[in-house]
Image (spheres, rainbow, N blue to C red):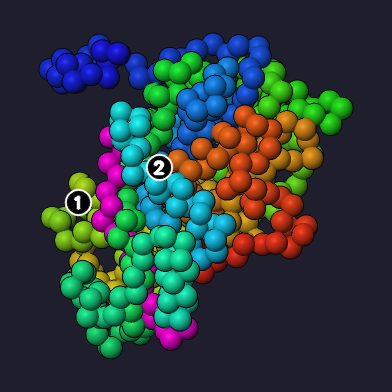
Amino acid sequence: MEKHSGFGLIRHGLSHHEHWPRMWRNPEPKPRYDVIIVGGGGHGLATAYYLAKEFGVRDVAVVERGWLGGGNTARNTTIVRSNYLWDEAAWLYEHSLKLWETLSQELNYNVMFSQRGVMNLGHTLQDMRDIERRVRANRLNGIDGEVLDVARIREIVPLLDCSCRTRYPILGASWQPRGGVARHDAVAWGYARAADALGVDLLQQTEVTGIRRSMGRVQGVETTRGFLAADTVGVVAAGHAGVIAKMAGLRLPIESHPLQALVSEPLKPVLDTVVMSNAVHGYISQSDKGDLVIGAGIDGYNGYGQRGSYPTIEHTLQAIVELFPSFSRVRMNRQWAGIVDTSPDACPILSATPVGGLFFNCGWGTGGFKATPGSGHVFAATLAAGKAHPLAAPFSLERFVSGRLIDEHGAAGVAH
Ligand code: FAD
Ligand code: PYC
C-alpha cells in the first residue's frame, strides 16, 4: 500500500499537508455485524484489530460516540510496566508488555515505545517490604525487576532529593528497566489504521444509547445512527462502562472517578526515566518534546466531568516539588482529567455477562494504558471463542461472588 511506504512518506512530507489520504474510511453503518465493539479507545481498537488479524472475524464495527482515542486513551500519562504482584495480573500485563515491544513493527506505525525504565519509590519500612516482595514475585514470573538502594537511585535520577531532610525520605525503590512510556494517540491511530485495512468499520460520532436484548441474549445496539444488529457485543467504554451496563439491566462493581494530569512548559532533557511515588501521591516523566508529565491519585468523588478538583492538583504539585525541589520554578501549561473505572480489587473485568453474547472489558481504573495490546488480544480471543482466554479467565465478574479477588492496590501506580 503506497500510503504506508517510504515513498509515500517523502511525497506527503513535501505536499504542504495537502491531499493526504485518510488513514481510515468513514463508512456508513451496515444494519448487521458479526461483532460490535462499543468504544473506540485503544482497548476497543486493539480488540477489533486482533479479531480481524488473528481470529478471522472481519465483519466488525467499532462504535464510538466521539472520536477515536478521545477518551482516556489520549488523556493518560502513558506509563507502561508489568510489575504487578499477583501471578494472574503479572501474566496479563507482561503479555501486554511483550506485545508493546514489537507493536510499532506489528502496526507499521511508530508508537514511540520508549523503554526508559519505571521507578516506584519507597518511603517507609513497610513500603520497602512491599517493594521487595513484589520484585521477588515478579522475578519468579520472569519479569525484570530490581530493588534499588538510595545510592543507585541518585545515580539514575540525580535531580531527586534523596536527603533525609524531606517529610517522607526516600528509602529505596523498585525498578523495572523494560517499563517506559509510549505515544498514546499513536497507539489509537496505529490500531485504527490497521483494523480499517482489515475491513473493520470504524463508526465515529455514533453513540450507543441502548442495548437490545431478547430471550436473555443480546440482539445489537441502539445508536444515534439507528439500530445495529450483532450476536456478539463487546463493551470497552472505560469510565462509562457502568452507564452502558445499566442499558442492559446490569450493575457492575465499578465506580467512575476523575483522574487528573498536568504538563509543564517544555524543558531541555532533565529526566530520562519515570518516577512514581504512591506514598506521596505524585509521579512524573519527561515527554520527548520536553514537557514534564505529572499525575496524581484519583479525585475522591464519583463523577463524569473531565476536570477534577484543585486540592488534588495542589497536593500533587507539593509532592513533586518535595521530590524534585529544582522543579519548583517550572510553570504548568495544561491540566485535564479523564474518567477512570475503578473496581474493588484494582483489577480489570474481562467477562461474559448474564446476557448471552454481551461481554465487558473495563475496570482498568488508573492503569489500563499499559494493558492496551494485551487487553485487546485476550478480549478478541474471548469474543471470537465465546469463552474466556486463559489469561482473561481470572478477571471474570464471577470473582466478586466467589471472593477470588486479585488485590493489586499496592501495585497500582496511583492511589485509588
Ligand atoms: P477509553 O480510551 O476511555 O475509550 C473508551 C471509549 O468509549 C471512549 O472513546 C468513549 O468516548 C467511548 N464511549 C463511552 N460511552 C460510549 C457510548 N455510549 N457509545 C459509544 N462510545 C462510548 N494507564 C496506564 O497504564 N498508565 C498511565 O500512565 C496512565 N495514566 C493515566 C492518567 C490519566 C489522567 C488518566 C485519566 C488515565 C490514566 N491511565 C493510565 C488509565 C488509562 O488511560 C485507561 O485505563 C485506558 O486508556 C483505558 O482505555 P480504553 O480504551 O478502555 O478507554
Ligand atoms: O498504572 O502505572 C500506572 C499509572 C501511572 C500513572 C497512572 N497510572
In which quadrant of the rendered view does residue 222 lie?
Answer: top right
N-term mark: 1 or 2 = 2
Up/down of 139 relative to 258, above or below: below
- Name the residue beneath numbered marker 1: 290
Q: Quick check: 271 left or right of 305? A: left
In which quadrant of the rendered view does residue 342 lie?
Answer: bottom right
For the point 65% across and 12% down, the residue is 31
For the point 66% across and 14% down, the residue is 32
For the point 34% across and 70% down, the residue is 146
- Name the residue beneath numbered marker 2: 99
Could you say where residue 83 lies in the image, as x and y percent from the top left? Answer: 43, 62
Q: What residue type is labelled 1?
A: Gly
Q: Which of 335 and 129 is in front in this view?
A: 129
For the point 14% across and 19% down, the residue is 10
The verdict on label 1 being within 8 Å of ligand 1 is: no
> In the rendered image, is residue 66 in sight?
no
> In the rendered image, is residue 381 in sight?
yes
The crowding category of the residue bearing disc 1, from other C-alpha atoms within 10 Å (few below 14, some 14 to 19, many at least 20), is some
Q: How far apart are marks 1 and 2 (CA)?
A: 27 Å
